[in-house]
């Protein structure tokens, strides 16, 4: 076992084989669920969108030196799209237990990006969920989970084994959060990223604090809650980074281990404002379907770290291409709100 270093990755020797297996499993599941004639082909995860919202992403002034990196190098305000979603691969009732997602696409970001085919696009994506850790501790375990899940869109048998009870508990915690409205919930990246020479995790917290609540009766209550909220007032999130300070207690390669906020408090780096708006239109919902989000839409200073993120690079790229090709829709990164055809 090597002595761990801050910010350093340690890929397993069999990671490439596991990544290839995971890719084939999820691509195969998607093609079986959406044979020719069944369109649109939807995402293999986070298939149900609760809304695509216009937002402003404003980098704060006066940041500490270690935080002033990449997108956060200097104060600026950017246009952004934010897609709130549920993690399941099929469209389900909001009353079903599930993990909720917040995908942020910041636009107008200059500089070459990491993905070769989208090197000159001007977007920086941040993908968050409503739990601070990811359930799977490594690529090998995630491959085993994927085999079971793809068979039945359920992994109960996998999770019932005593060796996986900790993973089951993390999934239970994540999916049983009392999210009554995505605009009042807290979200985390759960996996690490570069921040210049350092490693960090991201979080977005409602400016007035997280507010929990019980599910409403409607199967689409999350969208309905956002519609009602944004008809009356703006929404706001504080966007923050948490620096890795201990490579053992805050590991890069095991995202199932929480990074203690008492040991390394989150540092606010940006403010997200979601203005009052009407977003629940057929055209905007269709536009949401055609957007792609990946943590690899990023500047090199914010490179995703760890095995789960390395899987995402391969799988997200392939599934996005598969989905857009099947739907006959070009895959484009927006430069600003002006690219929205509405």
Image (cartoon, rainbow, N blue to C red):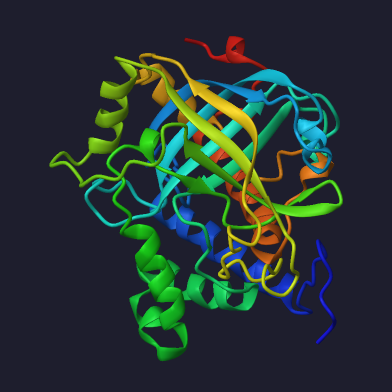
Q: In this view, does 74 lie above or below 325?
A: above
Residue 292 visible here: no
Q: Position of residue 113 (x, y in %)?
A: 81, 36
- Identify the residue at image location x=52%, y=11%: 341
- Is residue 338 toward the left or the right of residue 285 in the image? right
- Is residue 246 toward the left or the right of residue 327 in the image? right
Image-quadrant location for residue 162: bottom left
Q: In this view, does 49 lie above or below 121?
A: below
Residue 261 visible here: yes
- Closer to the camera, 340 or 61? 61
Image quarter hosting the N terminus = bottom right
- Closer to the camera, 38 or 169? 169
- Closer to the camera, 175 or 14? 175
Image-quadrant location for residue 99: bottom left
- Outermost residue toward the bottom in this view: 162
Q: Position of residue 202 (x, y in %)?
A: 62, 47
- Closer to the camera, 18 or 296? 296
């Amino acid at each position: 076992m090597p002595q761990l270093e801050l910010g350093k990755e340690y890929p397993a020797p069999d990671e490439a084989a596991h990544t290839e297996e995971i890719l084939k499993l999820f691509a195969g599941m998607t093609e079986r669920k959406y044979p020719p004639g069944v369109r649109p082909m939807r995402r293999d995860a986070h298939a149900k969108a609760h809304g695509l919202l216009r937002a402003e992403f404003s980098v704060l002034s006066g940041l500490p030196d270690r935080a002033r990196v990449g997108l956060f190098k200097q104060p600026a305000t950017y246009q952004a799209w934010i897609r709130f979603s549920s993690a399941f691969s099929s469209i389900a009732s909001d009353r079903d237990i599930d993990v909720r997602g917040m995908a942020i696409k910041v636009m107008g970001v200059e500089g070459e990006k990491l993905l070769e085919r989208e090197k000159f696009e001007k977007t920086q994506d941040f993908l968050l969920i409503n739990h601070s850790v990811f359930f799977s501790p490594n690529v090998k375990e995630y491959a085993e989970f994927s085999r079971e899940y793809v068979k039945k869109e359920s992994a109960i048998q996998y999770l019932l084994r005593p060796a996986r009870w900790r993973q089951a508990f993390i999934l239970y915690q994540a999916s049983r959060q009392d999210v009554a409205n995505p605009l009042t919930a807290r979200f985390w990246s759960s996996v690490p990223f570069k921040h210049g020479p350092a490693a960090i995790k991201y979080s977005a917290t409602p400016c007035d604090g997280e507010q929990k609540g019980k599910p409403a009766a409607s199967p689409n209550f999350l969208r309905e809650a956002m519609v009602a909220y944004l008809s009356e007032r703006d929404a706001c999130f504080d966007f923050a980074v948490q620096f890795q300070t201990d490579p053992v207690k805050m590991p890069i390669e095991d995202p199932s281990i929480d990074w203690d906020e008492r040991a390394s408090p989150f540092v606010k780096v940006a403010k997200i404002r979601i203005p009052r708006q009407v977003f629940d239109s057929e055209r905007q919902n269709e536009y949401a379907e055609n957007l792609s989000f990946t943590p690899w839409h990023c500047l090199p200073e914010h490179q995703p770290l760890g095995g789960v993120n390395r899987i995402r690079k391969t799988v997200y790229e392939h599934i996005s291409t598969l989905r857009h090709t099947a739907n006959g829709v070009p895959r484009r990164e927006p430069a600003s709100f002006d690219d929205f055809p509405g």
